[in-house]
Image (cartoon, grey):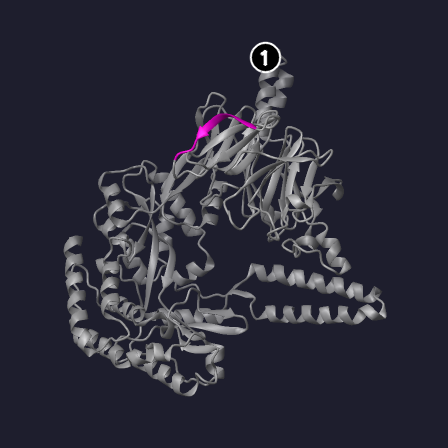
Amino acid sequence: MSCNSTTGFLFCVYFCYSSPVLALLISLLSAFAVHAEETGTVNLTDAHAYETATSLCFIEDTLYVLGSYGVYEYKDGELKTLVDLTDAYVYRYNQQRPEDAAGAAAWDRIIGYLFTDGKVLYGLHPYTGQIFKIEDGQLNACVQIPKNLLYAEEEEFFREIKGITYAGEKLILLLGTDTYDDYEKTEIVLIDLNDQKHQVSAIKNVQSIAAGAAGKLLVYVEAEQAAIWQYDIATDTIEKMVEQIEDGIFPSGLAGYKQSVVYLEDSKVVLIDENGKDLVKAYMPIQYAHTSTPSACSENGMYAYPYSNYVFLRDVGIEGEAKQTVLTLMGNVSSKTIIDFTIQNPDIAVVTTESMNPNELIQAAVSGDSGVDLFVLSAPGDFYSMKEKGYISALNTSEKLIGEARKLYPAMQDVVFSGDSLLGYPVSVSPKSWMVNETKWNEMNLGDYPKTYNELFEKIEMWLNEYATDYPEYTLADVQQMGLNTLVLSMVEAYIHENEASGMQLTFDTPSFREMMKCVSDNAYLLSEENEQWGMPLLTSMYLGFGTCYTDSDLNRMILPPALDLNGKQSLYAEMSILAVNAASKNAEVATRFVEFCAENLSNTVRYEMEPELNEPVESSAYYVRVAELQGKINDLAEQLEKADQDARYAIKEKIIQAEAKLEQLEERKWEIDPKSIEIYRSAAENLKVSYKSPLLLKGENGGYEALRSVVDKYCTQDFSDSDINALIAELDRVATMVYLESL
């Protein structure tokens, strides 16, 4: 353990004042300093770029973690690799042993789970049942449990290992079903590693297990009433209920700590003490948890929970409950952003809650509900109504946010500013562009991209007449597969974007909208069942990227959607998710800090989508990692080639050629944000619009968008014709009137 300022100060005090009381105090405070230093986050990518945590356990105060590429030890803030399992990585899902010697040797080293008897670290092979002692960086085979415990012979599949622990001098497995007739079936199997004898517990419906007090097992059972129970290993009986679990709660990461029970409930680390009292000991930045997620707790109260490439450590041995400031966030923000924020701000916990529908959201705001600090609001959608009604707190105290917001596209600034007041910051943007497979489009010599719906239908007709037979694996556009109603709905949405005006009711009874629908009715036969095609579309009506992307070796690029009128004027519409602070929040200052952090840590793609002055290409960090991996592989193969006999040289040369080809292909994709993508996006965004005021674009159960959808679904069938246009327009106007009146 390295010294810190606290322990150094105490050391000096001890030698200056040698009173026994002071000595005891210093000892206690020093212990606390050591303990606190271990609370935090272990990032396994520090050991391997693509590592994820899959199993873990403690031996005293040392944490051991199994990842896809190795076994790791974490102690005193230092992470180190105990066993490198990179060679076994590619075989970890191979249930059969490879025939070649190298593959077989690597497969034999697969570890699926870790466990300990409190003294020795063990690993379990998920297919053979081989148990390894993990010591001195080696896997030493020691015991093999019967394979028939893991493999359902009659059904011919391996059973899922849903939990593993060591308690009561037995290895205990929670196994998933052994029959196709009952997918929900689980069994607790208790194995004596000395004689390999085992017994199957009579306890049913167990979802997770953990070692409890001496000779006891903690089991979470989902039955008529879900509960955590204490199970006596020796007698195979349930002794007592530890905690009854409320409906809608799914405890994850079950662990025992002395006479207490620890688990994760949403973001809260809950401890049930020996008196049955529930205490929230800490928070974790976790948005999605599963009951079977493994966890562990050390003897001194350090609780460890794995999440992707992280292992979060929280001290459940503290007195009382957690002292963190809790920010409640309603909506979706990148889990990585939340994790990074809480790592840098350990005194703040960010707890996410499900998004409300717009009516519930506004009701919470009207009532002055301070239980929610931050909203993620949509534009178009609920951001406008919340902004207009004063339910959002201005962010003007943050010069940093004001400065960043002034870099956005003008259309985006119009949304987030009200005069000089900044009322939110975008955390995601969805440009409503289309995408074309440029490689295949040019190879087939399909000409110009369609700029109007008339041109789109002309291209579809040309494809059906001249290309469809020769290219059955492709189709021209995804609108041929979506249905007429989906196409019309997208056109209705674009019409609203184009014609919205604040405070004014929109009408669909216009020459331009009638012209649009006439274009559809005239060409509806092209989208009929008679002309159905289910090949890969060259032109798709959505694009979730920035400028360009690849599918296999084909280059795809974003293009503007067809124009709504014959003059061919195209526009790019965008939707935004905006992070805003609740005007009623009691943690407004801290919440603003979180908004600042989110703004500073947006992905490069989102930032480039929002800021027109960003025009320098960005290289991919993953590119260099992959290059290094491939170059290392080539170097290893070159060394093998030098030592290989004549018979083996040909195969090694082929592997070198393949690796060098992959290395060359990588060069084309070295950019996270490439120059061509920037050029394409900037050109498309010249007419960028964010139409956010219309209540007709509000999605969700009570939004106008759903009402419009139902109208379109009713009238825009395969038989859509000129006679349906008047009825469609009348019904759309009726819905528009109703929605506008309700929004007042």
Image spot of residue 214 (x, y percent) = 61, 24
Task: Please tell me in which quadrant of the rendered image residue 718 appears.
Answer: bottom left
User: Which span is picked out in magenta?
Assistant: 237-246
Locate residue 380, reporting x and y percent: 28, 58
Instruction: Identify whether 36 is placed above or below 462.
Output: above
Answer left or right for 372 relative to 537: left
Q: Taking 344 as reference, is 621 above or below it? A: below
Q: Which residue is mark 1?
A: 21
Report the side of 337 relative to 302 (left or right). Answer: left
Horizontal and vertical percent for residue 531?
37, 80
Depth check: give the residue in front, 568 or 304.
304
Q: Residue at x 44, y 27 (%)?
A: 279
Residue 118 makes an appearance in the image: yes
Q: Residue 376 in magenta?
A: no
Mark 1 residue crowding within 10 angstroms, few (<14) / some (14–19) / many (20+): few
Left/right placement of residue 593 relative to residue 440 reads left
- Does residue 243 belong to the magenta stretch? yes
- The secondary element bearing badge 1 is classed as helix
